Amino acid sequence: MMKSITHLNLSLQESIVLKKHNRFEIEVSVFTSIILTTVLVFFHFSRAGFESYLYEIHQIVGLGFFILCLPGYYIRINKISNSTIGLSALITLLLFLTLILISFLPKTISNIFFLSSIYIGYLLFLLHLIYFFKAKPLLYATSMILFGVLIGLWLFGRVYSGYHSPLAFENFSIGIISQDTIFHSSILEMIKTNGIPSTGLNDTPYLPYHWGSHWLLARLSILVNISSTLSYNLLYPCLLIPIFLKSVLIFSKDLFDLRNNNTSKYKTGVIFWLAFLLLIVGFLPYTFTSKWAIWDSWVGSESYLVGLLYFFLLSSVIIRAYTKIENAKIFALYALALSILLPLIGLLKISLLIILLATCCYLFLRLKLYINWVSSLALAISIILGYIIFKATNYLGDVENDNFYLFHFIKRWTQDGWKGFFYYFHYFFTFIYIYLKFKNLHVNFTNFKKLLFERKLLDVEILIVISIMGLIPTSLLRIDGGSAYYFTDIQARVSISLVLLFVLENYMNSYKFSTLLRRILLIVPLLIIFSLNNIFIKVETAFNNNLSSRIKMANYYKDANDSTEFIKGAQPDILQYTSGKFSDLDKKVDEMINVPFKGLKITPNYKLFSLLDSVNSFDVNLKSKSFIYVPKQNLLWSLFNNDRLSGLSIPALTGIKTIGALPKYLDDNYYRTYGYPTYKDQYYKTGEMTVHHYKGLNLDSARNAIDSMNYTLLYIPKNKLDTLKLTNNL
């Protein structure tokens, strides 16, 4: 009888634990799915008047739902109640691996799997939504969805107020393009076609660069069947960023379970989602924080964000391996697998590799893991592989020997008169979390040593290690382009997840506000106003950029009545443009939607880029066995203000390596970047191209250069913008 009662109590306990874990997973999945959907809806409306990409949007929505919702469904149907730490992250990593493997299958087979995952994703989201609304009061559910929409709005504004654009290809056609975007697109296309990270400017020499994010996007773009332009402007922001946001939330939850032995009840409330909104969007004005190089480049940099996504997922999996695997043989397999997976982050971002390895070394010593030979071997493998990856992804050592520069990042990117405040504001969330942690544990000089010995401050120790390791290269080295940010910002991303953990512990675990949290809440209304202002500024900027592009395109259009005075005479200010008489508003909106594409499609630029873009749909076997040649007399070389952009645009749009597309001149700054050192044997020391590769390269010499390789040469005649010719057949 007693055994039956005990068994019943254990079953009820497991049921409660399962229910609360599943609810949290489902809430996070629904929340991030709302973010994904919001960004895609506004992306669609921003393309009004142009090709809609509805089918591609449908694919990305379904794929996003599939990745976001499947972990929760797996936990639910398998009734896993005692080892959920890191499980969602592990399933997400396995899903990415599965999708990558599917992308290597023949197209007909991969399409079956891919389309199945899309429709399964829609079904899973619908089931999650039904369960969510059944389990939560309508007011709470509505509030959470509202916060998701607000973050989605901010994300749309942040992404499309920078390098990215819903009108990316159209902007490309009128010469509006960032060299960073076109550089990364060319690498992605060369990986898709040839399997080699290269810019493809004159064949495909290997580019020592952190090309991991390019490789991932290449595999996903093959799966979804979209170009590099759409990969960076649609697939990346609308799919990968929401998944990253989920990884941060799940990491905080895994830490909460770790501290509370996986048994504490969850009661996610409005405060938690509000805190997430404030931490992600920010509540300090952007013009204020930019004085200390506090940027939100974690959104704009594909390599950094994909690296952070991998960082948080892998961290959750490491926690799972360390705390939940008791079988020695299984732990050994886990440890050896992680020793290989961990240094792979260097392919995404070198800064993350250095800091993650340093943190692992600290934990190795701090937790005395050296007494276990498996842990020692795993760390040794990670360090060796990390060094190999560092050497394979870094070419600056060959061309740059003057890297030592004390406080270069602070001197270069911090506004004069404010440099002394750099550390206070740049490490704001780290200081906040340490303060909250010390306050919560009542840390003082008397008990500090005891808490340290009991590892009650291990999270603070890790945060300090990450902060110091990020500060060392920033303080000692000259890292051009503001890229030192990718060292110093890591602590901010980690500290934000820890502040979320504090909210979980002090609000959900106790079912009531702690005294400290109640004091913080007194200033929340003001923080909300500041945060909403940040959202509005980003969204307004994104719409202004969109309007600016439409005005430039409309200026090409003329009809008999010249009835486009609104759009042509407009300033790129969406609020000003939509102001005025209500009777004029319909006409303004109609012209803003319809006139730009009418103007764009008659330009020779658009015809040329449409031709280049159409080449991307060629069979990959033909593309990999081809070169493309565009004579210097072609319009392409005068479209941009420099021939660097013109040259990179060819492989970026066609997915085919070029011949004769290297720029004639490169100054020292450009020679060191954008992959040009891989072509160093084709430049004089002065930076001028040799006669063979530039001045004397006509159609005959281009054909002769590749004849011995049995390759196809595709070329665009000098004076024709809509004709592509082949000089020989395979």
Image (tube, rainbow, N blue to C red):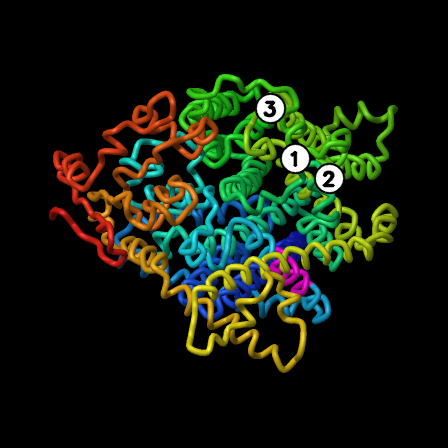
Q: Are marks 2 and 3 in contact (CB under 8 Å)?
A: no
Q: Are marks 1 and 2 in contact (CB under 8 Å)?
A: yes
Q: The N terminus appears in which quarter of the rendering?
A: bottom right
Residue 375 image position (x, y, % from top left): 52, 24
Comparing labels 1 and 3, the label whose residue is closer to the camera: 3
**Is residue 402 among what the camera can see?**
yes
Q: Amino acid at mark 3?
A: Pro
Query: Exactly how many numbered labels are in the figure?
Result: 3
Q: Residue at x 42, y 77 (%)?
A: 560
Q: Secondary structure at mark 1?
A: helix
Q: Amino acid at mark 1?
A: Gln
Residue 429 circle label? 2
In the depicted structure, whether residue 644 falls above or below residue 75: above
Q: Amino acid at mark 2?
A: Phe
Residue 653 image position (x, y, % from top left): 34, 50
Residue 694 image position (x, y, % from top left): 27, 34
**Is residue 261 among what the camera can see?**
no
Residue bearing the label numbered 1:
491
Binning the other alpha carbons within 10 Å of mark 1 as few (below 14), some (14 to 19) or many (20 upward) gives many
Give the magenta part as a residue range. 144-154
